[in-house]
């Protein structure tokens, strides 16, 4: 069975959208593969938005969340294999990638970047989706 970390329901997260989906922040599959929910500029514990209007602050928060969730899953940043980065404006690319690059120096994951018309909340400017694999010897 897969391990599901930080379970929640969308009716609590997005009450204005009248949703009812059981989700979680991370899934550990077969004890080694870690799939993270796309992370944004939102504190994992308080759900407070961080850095509204500031893509750098939102990226920093998303990367803190990623590090925290990987730790809760028994993984580390260096176990990241794949990133997908969603931006609401292509002008954010250089700044976001510079911040992510600082967090992942020496990791060398594959990465896909997309520019989208919007994210789940209008105040979110960047979302980062991660897949990691915990090595057998870890």
Image (tube, rainbow, N blue to C red):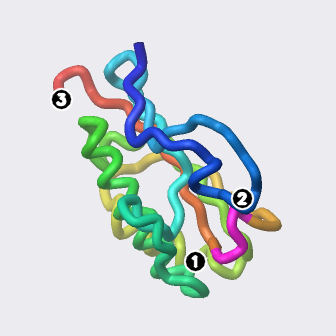
- Camera sees residue 111: no
Please give the name of the residue rendered at 27% of the width and 42% of the height, measured from the top-left corner. Answer: 72
Tag nearer the camera, 3 or 1? 3
Q: Tag 2's secondary structure? A: strand
| Residue 19 horizontal/vertical position (percent) | 72, 46
Of the 4 image quadrants, the one containing the N terminus is top left
Are there few (<14), some (14-19), or many (20+) residues within 10 Å of tag 3? few
Q: Which residue is mark 2?
A: 114
Please give the name of the residue rendered at 51% of the width and 74% of the height, measured from the top-left corner. Answer: 49
Could you tell which of marks 2 and 3 lies nearer the N-terminus? 2
With respect to residue 118, does 77 lie above or below? above
Residue sitting farthest toward the right: 117
Stretch in magenta: 119-123
112 relative position to 39: left or right: right
| Overall secondary structure of the magenta section | loop
Q: Which residue is mark 1?
A: 94
132 relative position to 96: left or right: left
Q: Which residue is mark 3?
A: 138
The answer to whether residue 122 is magenta is yes
Please give the name of the residue rendered at 40% of the width and 50% of the height, measured from the top-left corner. Answer: 108
Could you tell which of marks 2 and 1 lies nearer the N-terminus? 1
């Amino acid at each position: 069975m897969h391990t599901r970390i930080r379970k929640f329901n969308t009716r609590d997260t997005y009450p204005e959208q009248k949703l009812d989906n059981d989700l979680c922040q991370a899934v550990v599959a077969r004890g080694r593969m870690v799939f993270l929910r796309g992370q944004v500029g939102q504190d994992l514990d308080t759900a407070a938005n961080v850095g509204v209007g500031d893509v750098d602050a939102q990226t920093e928060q998303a990367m803190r969340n990623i590090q925290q969730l990987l730790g809760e899953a028994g993984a580390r940043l260096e176990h990241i294999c794949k990133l997908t980065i969603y931006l609401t404006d292509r002008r954010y690319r250089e700044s976001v990638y510079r911040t992510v690059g600082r967090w992942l120096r020496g990791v060398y994951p594959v990465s896909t970047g997309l520019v989208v018309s919007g994210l789940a909340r209008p105040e979110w400017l960047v979302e980062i989706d991660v897949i990691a694999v915990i090595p057998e010897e870890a």
